[in-house]
Image (cartoon, helix red, strand yellow):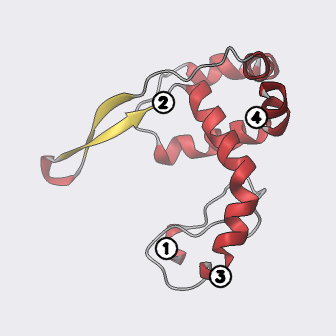
Amino acid sequence: MTVALANTLDLETAWKRVRADLPHRVFVRHPFELALIESDLAGWLSKLSTDIAAGTYHPSSMVVCDVPKGKGAIRPGAHLAMNDRVVFAACLGACLPYIHTSLSWSQGVVDFSYQLSKQPDDVQWLRNHFDG
């Protein structure tokens, strides 16, 4: 079962999606995390895939952090380890074609949520939020 899951997950695309989201949707950033991972990205993704296939991958605990808002307010934010972000993005990516098909009726109409990209395999899986 876990080997089939590892073969289903597209960790390379998931990494690209996580990487693209970092400047816009991440509250906590380690200054060297990306450079360290990308110094051997193929090895890092391979190890992650091997751990998933072997059944030894276990998500880390989420850390709640305070995120500043306007006028001195704060809101809770969740900080995930990078490998957990990639696995989550890969799992969501595996489901995205089905989600895309199910929600296609509402895409492109006035809505108060993010619109999905026009193609479910796009690295940028959400369109500009002003289009909603």
Mark 3 or mark 2, whichever is nearer to me: 3
Residue at mark 1: 130
Q: What element carries label 3?
A: helix
Task: Tell me which amino acid carries mark 4.
Answer: Leu
Marking on residue 105: 3
* Disc 4 to disc 2: CB gap under 8 Å: no
Q: Distance between the residues labelled 2 and 1?
A: 27 Å
Q: How far apart are marks 4 and 2 (CA)?
A: 16 Å
Mark 3 or mark 4, whichever is nearer to me: 3
- Residue drawn at (56%, 67%), measured in percent from left and top? 128
Q: Distance between the residues labelled 3 and 4?
A: 29 Å
Residue 45's x, y, as percent? 76, 23
Task: Tell me which amino acid carries mark 3.
Answer: Trp
Residue 91's x, y, as percent? 68, 42
Relative height, residue 110 to residue 132 (above, below): below
Q: In this view, does 10 lie to the left or right of 106?
A: right
Residue at mark 4: 11
Residue 14's x, y, as percent? 71, 40
**Earlier sequence position, callout 3 versus callout 1:** 3
Task: Tell me which amino acid carries mark 2.
Answer: Leu
Q: What element carries label 2?
A: loop
Q: Distance between the residues labelled 3 and 2?
A: 32 Å
* Disc 3 to disc 2: CB gap under 8 Å: no
